[in-house]
Image (spheres, rainbow, N blue to C red):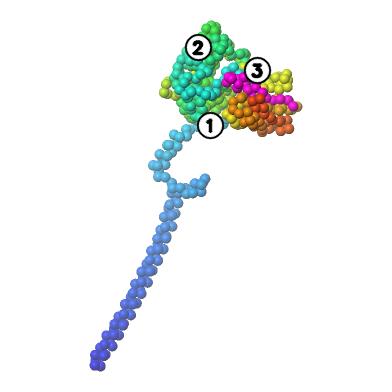
Amino acid sequence: MFLIAGLLVFSSANTIAQIKIDVKKKVNQQANKRANQRTNQAIDKGFDKIEEGIGNVFKKKDKTSGEEKEEQPEEKKQTNTKATAQEKPTPAEQPKPQLTWAKYDFVPGTEIIFEDNLEGEQNGEFPSKWDLVQGNFENASFDGSNVIYHMKCNMNGGGGIVPMLKNAKEDYLPEEFTIEFDAYFTENHGGNYVIYFGDYRNQTKLDKEYPIAKKWIRIAKNSVEGENFETNFYPGYKSGLYDKTPKWRHVAISFNKRALKVYLDDARVLNIPNLGYNPTGFSLGKQSVEGKDPGYTKNFRIAKGAVPLYDKFLTDGKFVTTGIKFDVNKATIKPESMGTINYVVKMMTDHPELKFSVEGHTDSDGETAPNQKLSEARAKSVMDKMVELGISADRLTSKGHGESKPMAGNDTPEGKAQNRRVEFVKF
């Protein structure tokens, strides 16, 4: 029994000892495992830092948003660079002169001979106020406006359209006249408009000494040329330098007895002191092939030139202008109005004793009350613009008369245009 008991005690002691050894081993194993885990975590964090540092090399900061953007692979970068180059032509291909109407000096005539804003025209029909010489033309809606669509026209040797006037067979352009219209140019630098200073439908035998075929000017997107004078360019352009941006241009032509001036938007591009012949009429077209590089024109006006506005003021104590134009049913001044406004500002600067009431008038379209408010708002817009240009506010007042004082009948486009006017009245 003692022997068995001793063996059991010995065996239990060994078992306990064995258990203790196993526990110690287990503890050591767990300790080693956890140490290894911490080491791995530390190593992982180290690699994370390294990878983050490497990643920053391939990142760049967006200066506008502050956000980080991944740098593109080299191949992708090259592709995008090419696309950008196509979207943004080099300065040699497309200079970007800024429109500055501050020096614009075109002042239109005050007696309107022909007016066509294409109001009420039916799309697809031939323009109702024009007559056809040669080509394909029709009314259309383009870029939010009613336009004349020049589908096909060959202006070499005559063609295009002419205004319908009662005296079309006579010389209907006076010694002093102005012509204005808006022309659209596509990205094709070769697409241009041709004006003949003669009516190719009705006046072919009017001037035998100087036939219509020689009375022409060609208007491109950034240049003007004509019979017996070289090409003249819009500021910032020269031969071989093309503007591929589609755009509208406001074309303005002034003739005074023998001198011709042509403007594109804000710049006087052509100034001929002696044209060498007498303009008798107006023909217009665009050198285009049907389905390719079409033309669009709108907002036509031919007006008779008047005596200088200051001389008119000295005689009547006021002067009337139809050259200050506004957006339809708004008081927003159109940029081409700046020629007339600049003229009046200079007049008041040269004659500091002058004080004017700026008075707005409308045609009879629409309701009487809104027309009254519109005329008041337009007169104030002109006054505010003159103050902005340096005229003291105490030298100006403004008022509106709406449709109450027409100068002409409201039954023709010319009469309506005559009634949409701004008067400067001495006070």
* Quarter where residue 351 is shown: top right
Say left or right for 77 vs 167.
left
Query: Which residue in the structure is indicated by mark 3?
Result: 306
Membership of 17 in magenta stretch: no
The numbered disc on residue 201 is 2
Say which residue appears at 45% left-offset and 37% top-offset: 84
- Kind of residue at disc 2: Arg
Residue 285 position within the rendered picture, expressed as x and y whole percent measured from the top left: 49, 18
Query: Which residue in the structure is indicated by mark 1?
Result: 96
Say left or right for 260 vs 16.
right
Say which residue appears at 55% left-offset and 30% top-offset: 97
Q: Nearer the viewer, residue 169 or 92?
A: 169
Tell me whether the residue at label 2 lies in contact with that at label 1, contact meaning CB atoms closer than 8 angstroms. no
Say which residue appears at 59% left-offset and 14% top-offset: 173
Above or below, comparing residue 8 to residue 237 in the picture: below
Above or below, comparing residue 273 to residue 101 in the picture: above
Membership of 419 in magenta stretch: yes
Determine the secondary structure under disc 2. loop
Say which residue appears at 47% left-offset and 24% top-offset: 123
Determine the secondary structure under disc 3. loop
Residue 220 position within the rendered picture, expressed as x and y whole percent measured from the top left: 51, 22
